[in-house]
Image (cartoon, rainbow, N blue to C red):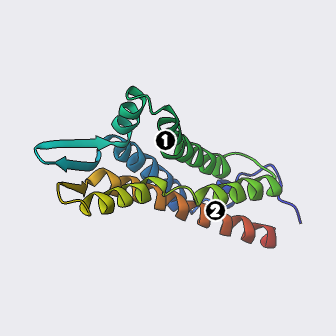
Amino acid sequence: MKIDLKKTLQQLYPNRIDILILIIASATLLFIGLHLPVLTVRKLWAKNTFSIISGIMNLWKDKYYFLAVIIFFFSVILPIVKLTTLFVIWYVRLRDNQRKWLLYGLGFLGKWSMLDVFVTAIIIVSVKLGALASAKAERGIYYFGISILLAMIVTNLQSNLVNRTKQVI
């Protein structure tokens, strides 16, 4: 049986306050994670600390436009689109197939969500292999990573609710 468009997913599951809390927590942690330092690199006497935002700006300033755009897309745009879509799925009246299509798309995009965390890890490992430099992960990468994980959890929770709703209604 099809879902009646008169109800949102939130209206079908009004006791599931955890979904909204997780979306808000993820958005908050994302904002913090984008602005806090994620990486500190030391070379002899020089020390550079970067946040995701400052790293994008430095790449752009140094004319690494392609890298700046890629990191901006995967680290800023994609997480914001994902959280906005999760909010829409929760609060907007959609057909069952629309919800499923959106959640499928989020699941596909979720595979790219941890790109920054992996890039930071690779940088740290590669710099540590050199004798004259060191790299250290900063707290911003943890905020960013937790934000992405929370968004993945919300995607999974909403997918389970959509699948259950189809069977119940």
**Residue beneath the point at 23% across and 43% down:** 49
For residue 7, which numbered disc appears in the image?
A: none
Question: For this view, does 64 lie left or right of residue 136?
Answer: right
Q: CA distance from mark 2 to mark 1?
A: 22 Å
**As drawn, is 118 to the left or to the right of 86?**
left
Residue closest to the far left: 45
Q: Image quadrant of residue 45?
A: top left
Q: Position of residue 112 (x, y in %)?
A: 56, 56
Q: Is residue 153 left or right of residue 147?
A: right
Residue type indicated by callout 1: Val
Q: Residue furthest front?
A: 131
Q: Nearer the viewer, mark 2 or mark 1?
A: 1
**Residue where numbered disc 1 is placed:** 76
Expressed as whole percent of the image width and height from the top left, the position of residue 104 reads: 71, 59
Q: Is residue 156 left or right of residue 75?
A: right
- Element type at marker 2? helix
User: Local crowd at mark 1 within 10 Å, few (<14), some, or many (≥20)?
Assistant: some
Question: For the point 54% across and 61% down, which residue is it?
Answer: 152
Residue designated by label 2: 158
Percent across and percent down for residue 26 are 45, 52
In the depicted structure, whether residue 94 falls above or below residue 130: above
Nearest the viewer among 156 and 58 is 58
